[in-house]
Image (cartoon, helix red, strand yellow):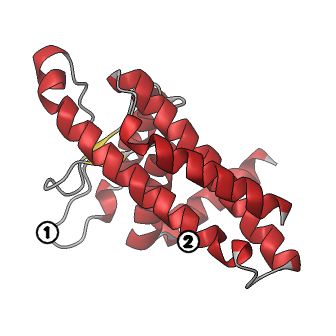
Amino acid sequence: MGASVEARRLALRDNADGNDVREGVRKLLEDLHRVGLRGTGGVYFVPDSAPNAEYNLKAMRAYIKALRPWVTGKLSPSCNIVRLHGEEAEHLREEIIESATEEFKRRLSDLADKVDPILHGRVNGRTADKIAFAATEDLLKIQSAVAAYRDSLRDDFASIGDMLVMAQTAVTRAMGE
């Protein structure tokens, strides 16, 4: 069985394209509660309290470095991981908090849009159940991300407190509808 798994892994690796790689990296970073730093393009902050953050980032870096044989054109895959400490970390802290707040507001707004059809009776039955289940998963991810940022940045993110409560209320109502 081990040989067939390895053969499948190699076949999938050889058939992956740039979009597959981007989607995989996007999903991993999303799971690590990343927020993009504005104006820097492709630079993200991941809180150290994200689940297995260091291990997963190192694995992602190794994976991206392994893509070098696939380089085409002028772009070369790269991934650098930088730990922020002391003055450097404090200098970026406000920018990270601002970026995280914007990200959480956007995700909470998207969540409200997702449950709106249930709350206004435009969908019901299995469709409503699917939407409510997905909204519950989204809410739990957002709450987990906010907790990770609170821990890492020592900030209470009070500016999104009301939005979090409203989202939780909306999702709870959607589950009960």
Where residue 156 appears, as percent x and y from the top left, is: 40, 28
| Residue in the picture at 19% in, 40% down | 95
**Image check: 88 left or right of 13?**
left
Q: Earlier in the sequence, mark 2 or mark 1?
A: 1
- Residue 139: give x, y in percent of width and height: 61, 50
The residue where tag 1 is placed is: 74
Q: Is 170 drawn above or below residue 124 in the view shown?
A: above
Foreground mark, 2 or 1? Answer: 2
Q: In this view, does 144 lie above or below 9?
A: above
Q: How crowded is mark 1: few (under 14 residues within 10 Å), some or many (20 or more)?
A: few
Instruction: Identify the amino acid type marked 1.
Output: Lys
Alpha-carbon neighbours of circle 2 within 10 Å: few (<14), some, or many (≥20)? few
Q: What element carries label 2?
A: helix
Reading the image, the residue beneath label 2 is 113
In the image, residue 77 lies at what x, y percent? 26, 56
Nearest the camera: 56 or 140?
140
Image coords of residue 1 (percent x, y): 82, 49
